[in-house]
């Protein structure tokens, strides 16, 4: 993984289990020293190209929600797997439907034991939502500076440079400050993980701030660009900022929607009462 020699995808979401992941129904039946998987997953990023998959399945029939699940490593070259691309609004096939028809996975590929699936999946998502965004944070810093430079060179319909517009300047300043805050929170999270061995619920704060900041930056970039925003074409390279704006909506859903992150923050960090 570290060498980049293997691509991994995540087999968590299903047609009836997106934000409420505990509703998964994809079955895994133990047959000797193998797990036989039947069902389907949805919105699987790079599923068409991945070598292996983190797969969450329900092993105990009739088990409710968080119980009876298993997290297994699935070889995507296994017989019985079919991957169908889904084209999204960026005109790309980044996500996929994955179908499993009697796919045999060695029990030795199970992380933890039967019933540990939810715990392992939540740990996986916590890393993804927190420190897993380090590469994206570096890219975000570069994008912030790129939009600032664009605002210094681009004139609005009024004739003023975009950077001289009070509203745009304020928003860019806030975005840069939020980006630096994300970086500080990430460094703090790394320290916490080193001391306790696993990320906590604060990963949801980082994920929420990261994706909302990315979206806010894309919106400012669109305002600065003006009519040029509509020159998209068939590929992201034609107009990268139009692509970034469209893709920013994807980021607020992928890895757990912003609404779910707010619920986690309210419940597990702020200890707010639930509405009846």
Image: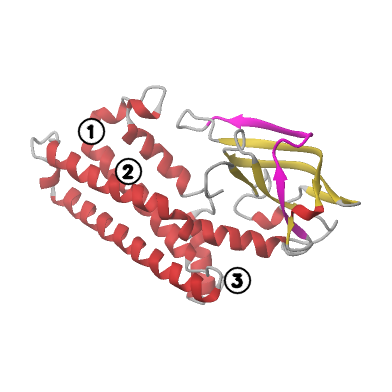
Comes first in the chain, label 3 or label 2: 2
Comes first in the chain, label 3 or label 1: 1
Relative to the observer, which residue lies in front, 55 or 96?
55
The quarter of the image holding the C terminus is: bottom right
Q: Which residue is mark 1?
A: 226
Q: Which residue is mark 2?
A: 218
Q: How many marks?
A: 3
Q: CA distance from mark 3 to mark 1?
A: 45 Å
Assess whether residue 24 is covered by the magenta stretch.
Answer: no
Res. 247 image quadrant:
top left
What stretch of residues is rendered in magenta? 69-87
Q: Secondary structure at mark 3?
A: loop
Relative to the observer, which residue lies in front, 82 or 268?
82
Q: Which residue is mark 3?
A: 276
Res. 148 image quadrant:
top left
Q: Secondary structure at mark 2?
A: helix
């Amino acid at each position: 993984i570290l060498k980049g020699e293997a691509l991994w995808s995540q087999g968590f979401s299903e047609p009836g289990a997106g934000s409420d992941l505990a509703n998964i129904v994809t079955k895994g039946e133990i047959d000797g020293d193998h797990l036989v998987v039947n069902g389907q997953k949805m919105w699987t990023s790079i599923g068409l190209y991945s070598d292996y998959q983190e797969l969450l399945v329900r092993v105990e029939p009739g088990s409710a929600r968080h119980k009876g699940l298993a997290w297994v490593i699935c070889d995507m070259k296994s017989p019985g797997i079919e991957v169908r691309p889904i084209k999204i609004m960026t005109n790309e096939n980044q996500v996929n439907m994955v179908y499993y028809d009697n796919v045999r996975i060695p029990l030795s590929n199970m992380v933890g034991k039967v019933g540990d699936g939810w715990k392992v999946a939540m740990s996986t998502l916590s890393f993804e939502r927190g420190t897993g965004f380090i590469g994206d944070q570096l890219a975000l810093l570069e994008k912030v500076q790129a939009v600032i430079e664009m605002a210094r060179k681009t004139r609005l319909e009024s004739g003023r440079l975009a950077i001289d517009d009070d509203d745009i300047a304020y928003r860019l300043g806030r975005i840069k400050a939020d980006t630096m805050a994300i970086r500080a929170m990430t460094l703090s999270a790394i320290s916490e993980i080193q001391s306790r061995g696993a990320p906590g619920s604060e990963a949801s704060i980082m994920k929420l701030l990261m994706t909302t900041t990315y979206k806010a930056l894309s919106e400012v970039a669109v305002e600065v660009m003006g009519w040029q925003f509509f020159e998209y074409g068939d590929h992201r390279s034609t107009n990268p900022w139009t692509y970034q704006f469209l893709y920013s909506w994807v980021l607020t859903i992928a890895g757990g929607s912003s609404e779910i992150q707010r619920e986690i923050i309210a419940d597990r960090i702020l200890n707010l009462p639930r509405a009846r």
